[in-house]
């Protein structure tokens, strides 16, 4: 059994299509098919149910997939550890986030500490993030809400209050707080369903007896401030996304613990390089400073 066979097998298992897998691997379809066939011959079993160029994992294939992913995961960790111990680091720190508002100051501080290390960041959904963690393809994730899984280490780094953002000319502007019941007739701008803060907000509003009416739903949280300034609607926004330069007032929510938890995640079996450990220290220190400022 060869390493290349495992890599090809996993790509076909993910795409379930020979043409797409070959394109992603930059190989010919015939070469890919022959490699998968040799793997099945080595194992003595068929791993896929085939319909034309569609290849769907059968029960044995699904069992083998988890073993193959684990094997490649361990090999990748070994490679990173040897690289880390052999000399100065000049590699790449791989990050994934569901919340980006806190990222710029964190990256700025890390670059000061480790200018030799490159950083690659992906904005992902929760499921995409979990998949990359299990494959060993990211060092850390910054997520809200947290992810609770046996193989994933989850450290809550901040409880971030959610505020109401209103334009300066709004009827509620100038106030320090507002009750949820005062917001029944408001039009909101927000992120699409699937984001952690959207689920949190909708759930708490339903418990207060109403469903927020959205005039805008998007997948770019940073755009919400501009929409609020333009008086398109009001928005529930985390305190860490607040910007004092905007023509926006931020009001606390009365009599309700509306807050999101921000978590730093990593796979328990992943080897953490010296650069990764330095990044973790920067994240913990940054959020610790924010939490002290809010108290």
Image (tube, rainbow, N blue to C red):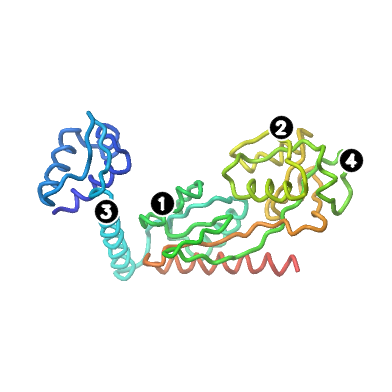
Residue plotted at (71% across, 35% down): 214
Secondary structure at badge 2 equals strand
Q: Position of residue 263 (x, y in %)?
A: 56, 61
Q: CA distance from mark 3 to mark 4?
A: 60 Å
Q: Earlier in the sequence, mark 2 or mark 3?
A: 3
Q: Depth check: give the residue in front, 283 or 157.
A: 157
Q: Nearer the viewer, mark 1 or mark 3?
A: 3
Give percent across and percent down for residue 64. 24, 53
Question: Is 216 above or below relative to 295?
Answer: above
Q: Which residue is mark 1?
A: 131
Examine the image and state in which quarter residue 274 appears: bottom left
Which comes sooner in the sequence, label 1 or label 3? 3
Residue occupying image coordinates x 50% and y 64%: 279
Residue that mark 4 sits on: 171
- Measured along the vertical axis of the image, is residue 261 above or below residue 191? below
Specify the label residue 215 is tagged with: 2
Closest to the observer: 67 or 153? 67
Work out how far the residue at label 2 is from the one at label 1, CA to CA, in angstroms.
Answer: 33 Å
Of the numbered discs 4 and 2, the one sitting upstream in the chain is: 4
Question: Which of the two residues, 116 or 149, is positioned nearer the viewer here?
Answer: 149
Q: Position of residue 25 (x, y in %)?
A: 26, 40
């Amino acid at each position: 059994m060869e390493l290349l066979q495992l890599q090809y097998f996993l790509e076909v298992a993910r795409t379930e299509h020979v043409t797409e897998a070959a394109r992603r691997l930059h190989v010919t379809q015939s070469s890919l098919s022959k490699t998968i066939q040799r793997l099945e011959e080595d194992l003595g079993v068929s791993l896929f149910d085939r319909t034309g160029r569609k290849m769907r994992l059968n029960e044995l294939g699904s069992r083998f997939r988890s073993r193959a992913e684990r094997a490649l995961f361990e090999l990748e960790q070994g490679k990173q550890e040897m690289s880390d111990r052999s000399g100065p680091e000049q590699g790449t720190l791989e990050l994934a986030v569901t919340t980006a508002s806190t990222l710029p100051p964190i990256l700025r501080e890390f670059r000061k500490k480790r200018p030799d290390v490159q950083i690659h960041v992906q904005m992902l959904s929760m499921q995409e993030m979990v998949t990359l963690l299990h494959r060993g393809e990211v060092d850390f994730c910054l997520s809200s809400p947290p992810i609770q899984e046996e193989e994933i280490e989850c450290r809550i780094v901040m409880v971030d209050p959610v505020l109401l953002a209103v334009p300066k000319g709004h009827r509620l502007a100038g106030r320090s707080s507002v009750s949820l019941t005062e917001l029944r007739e408001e039009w909101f701008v927000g992120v699409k369903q699937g984001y952690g803060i959207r689920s949190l907000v909708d759930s708490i509003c339903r418990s207060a007896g109403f469903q927020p009416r959205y005039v805008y739903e998007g997948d770019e949280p940073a755009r919400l401030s501009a929409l609020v300034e333009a008086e398109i609607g009001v928005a529930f926004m985390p305190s860490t996304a607040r910007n004092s330069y905007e023509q926006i007032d931020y009001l606390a929510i009365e009599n309700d613990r509306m807050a999101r938890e921000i978590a730093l995640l990593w796979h328990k079996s992943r080897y953490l390089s010296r650069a990764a450990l330095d990044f973790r220290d920067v994240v913990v220190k940054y959020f610790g400073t924010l939490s002290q400022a809010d108290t």
